[in-house]
């Protein structure tokens, strides 16, 4: 989760028997990313696992250097999103790092399987952030019928009943994000955490104003004020093949800065990314207690 996940959260997760993951973009510099990799390596318990998420399209100008550092230091897995994972699969495979790829439909699941992905993260229409259009049952079922690699379900998990439901549909595991925003270990503001307590599933809407790709956010008064659609000039330029990628890069940069300010500082410009699973977030809790609720509720 952009700006939310950190080494403390992942270490707590590993100590509780689950695998944690941090977006590489949470670190401003490659040295900071390297330090985080080394810290996790030193703290990893026997049987533990940790990974990093990479945005692998041209909007992330740091992608190639981040991949290089991750492969040099090592981790258990990489999750790719928003682009082709081909280069990541090739380079990570040489170091023994597994690659799990975010997919939203069967076409992309089959594509990443053909490229050598170790598993797919099936991002359904209940996910937070960049989500798919298919329901969890639809997406898991169609991928399992047509692919041979494992399916990990992402989206719609806020309680143990949701975990059980995804496993019943045929997923081998679940990827959970939004419930951990309101954790004591998260570095985001208390206002962001409390918003995940105070708001619910009906308050989650889609916006194009962060990365250029529709993304779920909490429907705060500020979001209502600025609107959720791309500007008219962005929509116009997006029709031009040559300019489209540059427009997305600019929108991505602007959106990430706005999200960072809202997550880390007190500001009226509240653009808080979250998914509908915050419906079941009722308190700000330690990571270990959130995990206990998901496993033992």
Image (cartoon, helix red, strand yellow):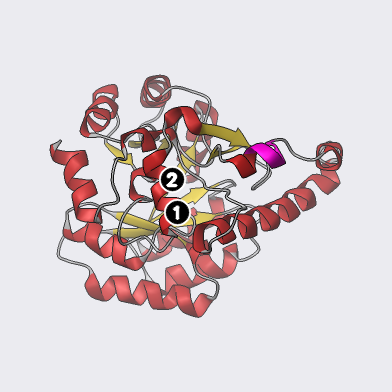
Characterize the local packing of mark 2: few (<14), some (14-19) or many (20 or more) Cα atoms within 10 angstroms. some
Q: Is residue 201 left or right of residue 221?
A: left
* Nearer the observer, 123 or 119: 123
Check disc 2 and report the residue beneath it: 195
Q: Is residue 97 above or below residue 141?
A: below
Image quarter where the C terminus lies is top left
Q: Is residue 47 left or right of residue 273?
A: left
Judge whether residue 119 can be spotted in this image: no
Q: Secondary structure at mark 2?
A: helix
| Mark sitting on residue 191 | 1
Which region shows up in magenta? 224-228
| Mark sitting on residue 140 | none
Residue 41 place in picture, x, y as percent: 28, 72
Residue 128 place in picture, x, y as percent: 47, 39
Classify residue 40 by image quadrant.
bottom left
Residue 288 place in picture, x, y as percent: 20, 54
Q: Is residue 264 left or right of residue 294?
A: right
The answer to whether mark 1 and mark 2 are in CB contact below 8 A is: yes
- Residue under the image location 78 percent in, 53 percent down: 246
Residue 133 place in picture, x, y as percent: 53, 25
- Residue under the image location 44 percent in, 68 percent down: 70
- Residue under the image location 65 percent in, 47 percent down: 211
* Nearer the observer, 114 or 101: 101
Characterize the local packing of mark 1: few (<14), some (14-19) or many (20 or more) Cα atoms within 10 angstroms. some
Q: Secondary structure at mark 1?
A: helix
């Amino acid at each position: 989760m952009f700006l939310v996940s950190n080494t403390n959260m992942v270490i707590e997760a590993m100590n509780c028997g689950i695998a944690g993951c941090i977006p590489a973009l949470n670190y401003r510099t490659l040295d900071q990313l390297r330090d985080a990799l080394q810290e996790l390596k030193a703290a990893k318990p026997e049987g533990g696992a940790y990974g990093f998420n990479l945005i692998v399209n041209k909007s992330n100008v740091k992608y190639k250097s981040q991949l290089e550092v991750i492969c040099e230091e090592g981790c258990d897995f990489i999750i790719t999103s928003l682009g082709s994972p081909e280069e990541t699969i090739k380079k990570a495979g040489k170091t023994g790092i597994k690659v799990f790829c975010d997919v939203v439909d069967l076409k992309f699941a089959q594509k990443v399987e053909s490229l050598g992905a170790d598993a797919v993260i099936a991002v359904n229409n209940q996910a937070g952030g960049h989500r798919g259009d298919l329901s969890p049952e639809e997406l898991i079922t169609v991928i399992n019928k047509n692919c041979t690699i494992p399916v990990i379900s992402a989206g719609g998990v806020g309680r143990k009943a949701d975990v059980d439901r995804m496993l019943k549909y045929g997923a081998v595991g679940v990827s959970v994000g939004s419930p951990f925003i309101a954790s004591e270990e998260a570095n985001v503001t208390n206002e962001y955490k409390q918003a995940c307590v105070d708001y619910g599933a009906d308050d989650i809407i889609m916006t194009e104003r962060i990365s250029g790709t529709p993304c779920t956010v909490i429907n705060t008064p500020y979001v209502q004020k600025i609107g959720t659609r791309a500007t008219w000039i962005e929509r116009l330029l997006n029709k031009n093949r040559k300019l489209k990628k540059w427009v997305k890069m600019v929108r991505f940069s602007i959106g990430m800065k706005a999200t960072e300010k809202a997550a880390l500082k007190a500001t009226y410009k509240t653009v808080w990314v979250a998914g509908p699973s915050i419906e079941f977030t009722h308190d700000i809790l330690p990571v270990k207690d959130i995990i206990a609720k998901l496993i033992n509720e």
